């Protein structure tokens, strides 16, 4: 007698999710079918707007109904039809049968409650354990996710732990009831490579111990290569390809999958350009910045933290200098000191021989036209009440340009960054993330600067949009002879865009040189560790996918 196949952790049949009237399409998902077996990791891949996160919302019954709702199909979690469950029954299933690891733990965690209280809440709602039993279980889970000093972490608030540790707290919360299905929605997007690799290994390790099925939502094919057993590719709500990870990664069949994989930046830098004869346009000398911070993990004592320690660098005309390192290495602090958004304790930043740090506010205002910044989050840096044409024209107008001429130049810049001039009269919220980043670049270019400082400008973008923005930056740099100071934790991006890189650890430069030379033969142990931690490092996109692009 043939033994019956085990019930899958998740089975979705012909799922359709309706969007509100007036949306760009009637269905966010149109006919999605997939299966996640126990002990299997299935990666759901696609660009923003493909329906990945709404799939997770439907499984958890957390869609913003009635505007967005399931319009057809079925979802079975461990054999149970969740669409037929009452709200009370679904509440009981969440955490116990199915749980979710969210993309941004700082948003998902309650800032007014301790880490221990928030994990304990899951146990209070779903178990009959005593208070002492619950605390022991919480500390056990914090140990399992490798948080240092779990007993102290139990009493910490979310802001008192690092980003990687907050993500571990979310994982502990998701796994504390040993659910059969775990949904992970972009859980490593904002993390540096070493923390990202630790989290991926942790999810795989705990999933294997528990035998749970994992639906892992991501747009990062390096992560897919690192963790996936099976891959499902979505395009605008429709599944275009599905198969074992090795097959989809190494022999993609659909042109869309091929194009996505072709957009993954190569880890082999292009041949180095020589900038020795080019003049130095930006020079940092002996930069130091110290912050006051809480001492210990949660002790409350005050001590100083040196974010940048006696840092010196040079950036030449037409060159791109990458600043790489883990979170807390001082990368963003450097970018803000250079643009005088943060005051250094000591040192000098010379722009064509003028020390920006010695400039008066009035002098610095005049110098800002020569050094502009592209921020990581364009939505946070663009005024939501101003039209795009006014956002771009604002800088030149402040610096004395005629309003009519500045607005005309703004429309020209929109074309330069490959946006329609018709977009000029729209507001920031009417654009996609990639389009908003293009607007941010246009705004930075409006003053015709000599230097652009870009702080993680593509870290939150889909792989295909990321490739477009990087190509745009490289083209503009070459056309306008710009110099770029490019801050990133994504070493794939650094490999393709940066001519030279400086590697930072604890505020200091531990290695510097031509990108190709450092990637080929890193000298410092920390650099070697960063490079070996890149997710999917051993996977090389197939030539067929590259040619398809």
Image (cartoon, grey):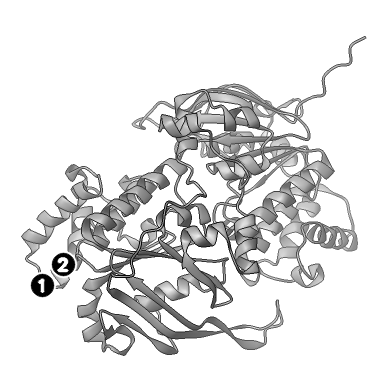
The residue sitting at 32% across, 53% down in the picture is: 474
Q: Residue 72, percent across and down?
A: 55, 21
| Residue behind mark 1 | 400
Say what secondary structure mark 1 lies in: loop
How many badges with numbers are in the image? 2
Q: Is residue 404 left or right of residue 538?
A: left
Question: For mark 2, does the 10 Å Cα neighbourhood hold few (<14), some (14 to 19), or many (20 or more) residues?
Answer: many
Q: Quadrant of residue 214?
A: top right
Q: Position of residue 83 (x, y in %)?
A: 64, 27
Q: Is residue 509 left or right of residue 80?
A: left
- Is residue 329 at least partly visible in the picture? yes
Neighbor class of circle 1 (other Cα within 10 Å; few <14, some 14-19, many 20+) is few
Cα gap from disc 2 to disc 1, whole angstroms: 6 Å
Q: Residue at x 83, y 63 (%)?
A: 139
* SS type, badge 2: helix
Where does the C terminus fall, quadrant-wise?
Answer: top left
Quick check: 511 left or right of 149? left
In this rendered view, identify the residue nearer to me: 374 or 537: 537
Quarter where residue 248 is shown: top right
Q: Which residue is mark 2?
A: 396
Q: Quadrant of the N terminus?
A: top right
Q: Can I make out residue 387 in this image?
A: no
């Amino acid at each position: 007698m043939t033994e019956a196949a085990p019930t899958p952790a998740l089975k979705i049949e012909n799922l359709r999710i309706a969007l509100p009237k007036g949306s760009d399409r009637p269905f966010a998902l149109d006919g999605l079918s997939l299966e996640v077996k126990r002990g299997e990791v299935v990666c759901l891949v696609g660009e923003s707007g493909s329906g990945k996160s709404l799939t997770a919302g439907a499984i958890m019954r957390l869609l913003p109904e009635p505007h967005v709702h399931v319009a057809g199909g079925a979802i079975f979690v461990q054999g149970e039809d969740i669409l037929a469950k009452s709200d009370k029954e679904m509440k009981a299933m969440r955490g116990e049968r199915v749980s979710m690891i969210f993309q941004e733990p700082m948003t998902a965690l309650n800032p007014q409650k301790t880490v221990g209280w928030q994990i304990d809440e899951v146990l209070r709602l779903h178990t009959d354990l005593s208070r002492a039993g619950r605390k022991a279980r919480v500390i056990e889970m914090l140990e399992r996710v490798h948080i240092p000093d779990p007993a102290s972490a139990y009493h910490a608030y979310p802001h008192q732990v690092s980003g990687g540790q907050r993500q571990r707290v979310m994982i502990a919360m998701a796994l504390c009831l040993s659910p059969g299905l775990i949904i992970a929605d972009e859980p490593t997007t904002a993390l540096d490579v070493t923390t990202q690799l630790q989290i991926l290994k942790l999810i795989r390790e705990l999933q294997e111990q528990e035998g749970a099925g994992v639906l892992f939502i991501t747009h990062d094919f390096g992560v897919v290569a690192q963790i996936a057993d099976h891959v499902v590719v979505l395009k605008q709500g429709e599944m275009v390809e599905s198969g074992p990870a090795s097959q989809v990664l190494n022999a993609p069949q659909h042109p869309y999958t091929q194009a996505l994989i072709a957009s993954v930046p190569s880890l082999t830098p292009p041949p180095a350009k020589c900038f020795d004869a080019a003049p130095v346009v930006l020079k940092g000398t002996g930069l130091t910045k110290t912050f006051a911070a809480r001492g210990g993990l949660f002790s409350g004592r005050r001590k100083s933290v040196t974010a940048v320690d006696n840092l010196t660098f040079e950036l030449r005309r037409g060159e791109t200098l990458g600043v790489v390192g883990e979170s807390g290495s001082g990368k963003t602090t450097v970018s803000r000191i250079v643009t005088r958004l943060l005051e250094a304790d000591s040192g000098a930043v010379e722009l064509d021989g003028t020390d920006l740090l010695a400039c008066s506010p009035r002098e610095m205002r005049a110098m800002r036209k020569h050094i502009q910044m592209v921020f990581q989050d364009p939505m946070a840096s663009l005024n939501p009440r101003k039209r795009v044409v006014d956002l771009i024209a604002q800088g030149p107008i402040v610096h004395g340009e005629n309003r009519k001429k500045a607005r005309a130049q703004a429309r020209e810049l929109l074309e330069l960054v490959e946006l329609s001039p018709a977009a000029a009269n729209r507001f920031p919220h009417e654009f996609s993330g990639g389009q908003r980043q293009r607007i941010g670049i246009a705004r930075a270019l409006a003053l015709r600067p000599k230097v652009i400082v870009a702080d993680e400008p593509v870290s939150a973008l889909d792989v295909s949009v990321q490739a477009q923005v990087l190509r745009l930056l490289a083209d503009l740099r070459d056309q306008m002879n710009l110099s770029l100071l490019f801050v990133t934790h994504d070493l794939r991006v650094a490999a393709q865009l940066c001519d030279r890189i400086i590697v930072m650890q604890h505020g200091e430069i531990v290695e510097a040189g031509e990108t190709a030379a450092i990637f080929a033969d890193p000298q410092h142990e920390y650099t070697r560790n960063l490079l070996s931690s890149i997710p999917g490092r051993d996977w090389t996109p197939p030539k067929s996918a590259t040619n398809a692009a």
